[in-house]
Image (cartoon, rainbow, N blue to C red):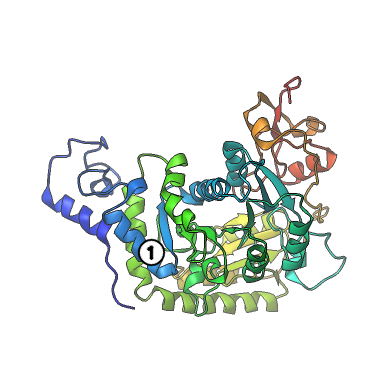
Amino acid sequence: MKAMSTPISDFIERTIAGGAARLHVPGHKGVGPLGCEPWDITEIAGADELYAASGIIAESERNAAAHFGTAATFYSCEGSSLCIRAMLALAMTHRAAPGKRPVALAARNAHKAFLYAAALCDFDVEWLVPGPRPAATSDPRAERADSLCACPVTPGALAGRLDALAARPFCVYVTSPDYLGGVQDIAGLSQVCHRRGVPLIVDNAHGAYLKFLPESRHPMDLGADLCCDSAHKTLPVLTGGAYLHVSKAADPRFAEGARQALALFGSTSPSYLILQSLDRCNAALAGDWPERLRKAAARVDTLRQALRGRGFREISGEPMKLTLEGDGFAMAEKLRAGGVECEYADRRHVVLMFSPDSRDGDFERVDRALDAPLPLPDGAGHPGVPRLQRAMTIREAVFAASETVPVREAAGRVCAAPAVACPPAIPIAVSGEVLDEAAVKVFLENGLESVRVVREGTSR
């Protein structure tokens, strides 16, 4: 691939070289203890404006769109959370039945940003939930089926649910890859959606790199209409850098309205450090990064096979993530003692994420630390995701007067703010749902001791 321009970075390098007095924000004036201050600017003349881009930012975004093969790609300096809110606002604005109360059909393992989008945009949610876990199976998708982090959805199940709904939802929303490395059948799901005139939105926060595998597995190539990528999770980008992608086959109004939707929720002071990082990533992707990714994926697979050979159960479906089933907290401690910090651990899993920038020593440390499997601890069965009754809309519950109570006293109360650790930031209970003893059990098993609930006596 030919070299790709880096217009944002080039402009800032020229600005630094020019030596002009910085009588504008930020207050550090280009000097400070971090060392990065010279590159931290604001919307000065020539720097463009993120939510009204027509200059260097627009040029850089076009470079990104060329990489991903999209109708348009837009930058976010506030992660995929901003993109999720913008995508849902876009789809809701251009829904087929604007006179009716908007409803999204979503997989239950949605990030809490999805719930806050529902509160801000005031739409309802019909949930896609996985079926019961089989008593015995070798299918890793089934092993994840009742995890809070996962919600495998088949095209057949989606079709049945769409056909059973009384009103057409304004979108179908799924997370793929999920936190445990599960990957949805995006091609199959998109066909189901498009036959029924419903856009498919994908939270692809963990999957930006899927585009650059020898055979792309990115949602934009598999039929999704809108998706977000947390570029910082799997590409060489600073934390907070993300993309909102619009498919070439999507409703053209999505691309036309994306900046406005992002501006509705985004800060007017985006980080130019993050923008430079996204800009320079384009050049990296045009260079040897895809080849380095291929080699890194092979290295991960070698480690995967070695761990399986020792008796570890590895259940990830994506090539740059290792998800080991067992006593996750104990495995995380063994890894930490061996100089490795994992991405995520719970009672039943530990998750390790690699990239082309992972060093040889990183693989070797994991190999040494995980010498033998650690079985699930006593009582760490599969409690399932709680199925709760709704008493209020998400918006009503989020904006209601609320209080924090001990989880052990929460049964019978209405969930206000979604309580969950980050990662994985997937709510155990949805705002507006009535908590029961099953929910209390799942809260406690996930280490949560308190929960925000609607104050008693609040009108519904």
Q: Is residue 356 visible?
A: yes
Q: On the picture, is 92 further left or further right than 406?
A: left
Q: Is residue 37 left or right of residue 22?
A: right
Q: Could you tell me which residue is drawn at 53 percent across and 71 percent down?
A: 221
Which residue occupies 81% across, 52% down? 383
For badge 1, the amino acid type reads: Ala
Front-most of residues 438 and 368 = 438
Number of numbered discs on residues:
1
Q: Is residue 244 above or below residue 71?
A: above
Q: State whether residue 78 is above or below residue 339.
A: above
Residue nearer the viewer, 45 or 193: 193
Q: Give the crowd class for mark 1: few <14, some 14-19, many >=20 residues within 10 Å.
A: many
Badge 1 element: helix
Residue at position x 57%, y 70% in the image: 222
User: For mark 1, what is the residue?
Assistant: 64
Q: Position of residue 134 (x, y in %)?
A: 85, 65
Indicate the position of residue 137 as horizontal and vertical percent values. 82, 71
**Residue 77 location, x and y as percent?**
41, 49
